[in-house]
Image: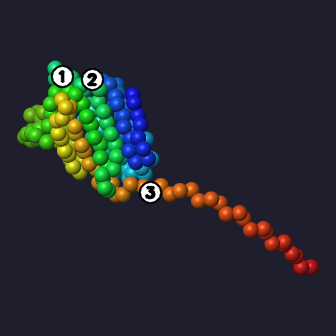
């Protein structure tokens, strides 16, 4: 695992293994806590990062990704999750919505990961560049937290002597 980043961004590289999901989850939650994100955004970010990494690992095809790069940062007032892999070329924007089942018996198991990501993110973009998939998800969150410089403590004024009247 590689992790770096500045005050408002962070990067992580994981192996293309399902066991890495715990590390992705911890990384997302750590960054979200530092950014003071609302719970609603944290839950969506966690769900979508899990779905995307799971899809890369399980559906990479013959060209399964060896490593998955993730980056979290701000784009204006939205959190951007960028996921990059060298697996099979896959444009999530073109993935069809699953057909609605007419009965529980006809309900399809699986195939809901991309629709979940579409539903719980506020924007999705994709490009294929240099033999790699680049997926960017946006989550409306408000402005990034401001970091104020610590203010030096002012020396306290001496206490006035106490007097008691008898």
Labels 1 and 3 touching (C-beta < 8 A): no
Q: Is residue 138 left or right of residue 110?
A: right
The mark found on residue 63 in the picture is 1
Where, by quadrant of the figure, is residue 116 drawn? Answer: top left
Q: Observer-nearest residue: 86 or 109?
A: 86
Mark 1 → mark 3, Cα distance in angstroms? 42 Å
Q: In the rendered view, would you say 7 is above or below 56?
A: below
Q: Is residue 102 left or right of residue 32?
A: left
The mark found on residue 146 in the picture is 3
Q: Observer-nearest residue: 74 or 108?
A: 74
- At x 15%, y 30%, the residue is 89
Q: Position of residue 50 (x, y in %)?
A: 29, 35
Where, by quadrant of the figure, is residue 159 drawn? Answer: bottom right
| 2 or 3: tag closer to the N-terminus | 2
Q: In the rendered view, would you say 121 is above or below 60?
A: below
- At x 57%, y 56%, the residue is 150
Where, by quadrant of the figure, is residue 53 drawn? Answer: top left
> Which residue matches tag 2?
66
How is colour applied across the structure in the image? Answer: rainbow
Q: In the rendered view, would you say 11 is above or below 154?
A: above
Q: Position of residue 28 (x, y in %)?
A: 37, 40
């Amino acid at each position: 695992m590689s992790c770096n980043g500045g005050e408002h961004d962070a990067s992580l590289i994981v192996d293309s293994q399902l066991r890495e999901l715990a590390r992705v989850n911890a990384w997302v939650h750590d960054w979200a806590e530092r950014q003071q994100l609302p719970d609603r955004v944290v839950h969506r970010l966690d769900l979508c990062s899990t779905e995307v990494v799971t899809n890369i690992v399980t559906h990479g095809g013959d060209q399964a990704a060896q490593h998955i790069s993730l980056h979290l940062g701000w784009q204006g007032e939205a959190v951007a999750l960028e996921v990059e892999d060298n697996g099979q070329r896959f444009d999530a924007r073109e993935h069809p919505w699953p057909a609605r089942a007419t009965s529980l018996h006809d309900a399809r198991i699986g195939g809901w990961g991309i629709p979940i990501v579409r539903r719980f993110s506020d924007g999705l973009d994709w490009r294929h560049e240099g033999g790699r998939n680049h997926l960017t998800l946006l989550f409306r969150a408000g402005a990034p937290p401001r970091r104020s410089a610590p203010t030096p403590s002012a020396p306290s004024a001496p206490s006035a002597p106490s007097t008691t009247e008898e």
